[in-house]
Image (tube, rainbow, N blue to C red):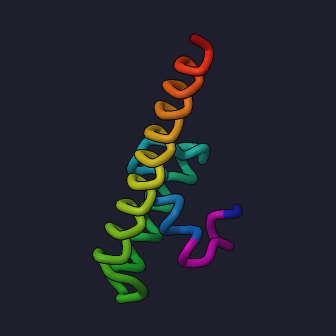
Amino acid sequence: MRIFNMDKTALLKHHALIVNKSSSLSSSQRATVLQRVAYGIEKGHWTEKDVKAEISNLNEFIVKNVVDRINTAAHDSITEE
């Protein structure tokens, strides 16, 4: 299973995707990621702050992309007039 081969960065990124309901993983893979992240926090491999920072980074990325798409669409509609 590819989940067990993920490094810390990949796990935290997938966790952020799961939190944002954007993960392409199967339900069992999502459950495994959540368990591994919880275990990593419990064992001190990373902190809740690390996990929250990755979620925040993903949220900022999503917002930026949405704003960029809106601005592009608005610009395109103005130039078509």
- The image shows a total of numbered marks equal to 0
Quadrant of the image occupied by residue 7: bottom right
* Percent x, y of residue 23: 54, 46
* Percent x, y of residue 42: 32, 81
Determine if the magenta segment contains residue 18.
no
Between 10 and 43, the residue placed more toward the observer is 10
Give the side of residue 12 with respect to residue 3, left or right.
left
Task: Give the residue displayed 42% in from the left and 70% down from the top.
Answer: 37
Q: Quadrant of the C terminus?
A: top right
In this view, 2 is above or below 72? below
Between 4 and 50, the residue placed more toward the observer is 50
* Percent x, y of residue 52: 32, 67
Quadrant of the image occupied by residue 77: top right
Give the magenta part as a residue range: 3-9
Task: Give the residue displayed 29% in from the left and 76% down from the top.
Answer: 49
Task: Give the residue displayed 53% in from the left and 68% down from the top.
Answer: 11
Between 62 and 27, the residue placed more toward the observer is 62
Give the side of residue 1 with respect to residue 69, left or right.
right
In this view, 65 is above or below 80? below
Q: Quadrant of the N terminus?
A: bottom right
Task: Give the residue displayed 53% in from the left and 28% down from the top.
Answer: 75
Magenta stretch mostly in which secondary structure? helix
* Percent x, y of residue 44: 35, 88
Residue extending farthest to the bottom is 44
